Amino acid sequence: MSLQKFLTSKVFFKQLAIALGIIIVLVFVMMKWLSFTTNHGEEITVPDLSKLSVAAAEEKLDDMDLEYVLLDTTEYQKDYPKFSVVKQDPIAGSKVKSGRKIYIKINSDAYRDIIMPDLIEQSLRQVEPTLKALGLEMGEKTYKPYLGKDMVLEMRYKGKKIKAGDKIPKASKIDLVLGDGKVGFEEEVDSIPTTIDDEEF
C-alpha cells in the first residue's frame, strides 16, 4: 500500500485517534498529579505570630499545616515579651501553600550593653545628643558650685557614680551632676588669708 493510500485509509485515522486519545489521557493524568502535589487552588492565610512564644507559634503553625524556621534574636524591644516573636516572613495575612516555611525572629531577653563614653567636662548641649545616639536616656540633673555652667562633673546610674568604659544597659537613664556656673561662697572665703604675718608690715 502506498503512503498516500495509507494516509487516507481507515486504519491510519483509527491509529491517529488512538494516539490522540492516549495523549489526552496522559495530559489529564499529569494535570491531576500536578494539582495534587502542589495543592493547586488550596491557599492558607498566614496567622499573626506577633508576641507569641516559640512553642505557641509552633503549635499554631502545626494546626495549619505550616512550618517555622527560627532565624535569630532581635535587639530587645520592651513592647514584646522576652523570647516572643517580633518579626515573621511571610507577614500575617499572606496567602501560602500547605507546608510553607514561616521564618521568625524572636525578642532578646534584655537590652544590650552600651559602653559609656567620657562625658566629663563636656557641656550639657553636647552630652544630650550623645546619650540619645547611644540609646540612653537623660535622667535627673543636679547642680553644684562650679565655674563652668552646665558642665558635666559626674555621671550616675541608679545612684552610683560611673565612669567612661563602664557597661550600661541600653535605654537606661543616666543622671548628671552639672556645674551651676558659680564659684561657691565657701571657696571664695577659703581663698582669703586668715592670718597676717607680722613681717609683712
Image: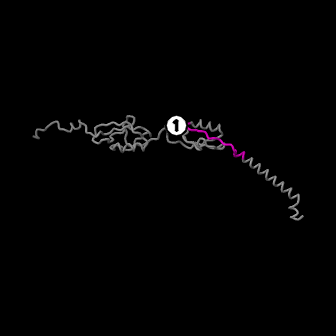
46 in the magenta segment: yes
- In the rendered image, the residue lying farthest to the left is 201
Can you say whether 23 is above or below 5 in the image?
Answer: above
**Main secondary structure of the magenta stretch:** loop
Instruction: Name the residue: 72% across, 46% down.
Output: 35
Provide the residue span drawn in magenta: 35-51
- In the rendered image, the residue lying farthest to the top is 159
Which quadrant does the C terminus fall into?
top left
In the shown orientation, is residue 41 left or right of residue 163?
Answer: right
Residue underneath mark 1: 80
Crowd around label 1: few <14 · some 14–19 · many ≥20 (10 Å): some
The image quarter containing residue 167 is: top left
User: Label 1 amino acid?
Assistant: Tyr
Q: Nearer the viewer, residue 6 or 142?
A: 6
Task: Indicate the position of residue 43 as horizontal and vertical percent values.
Answer: 66, 43
Instruction: Name the residue: 81% across, 52% down.
Output: 22
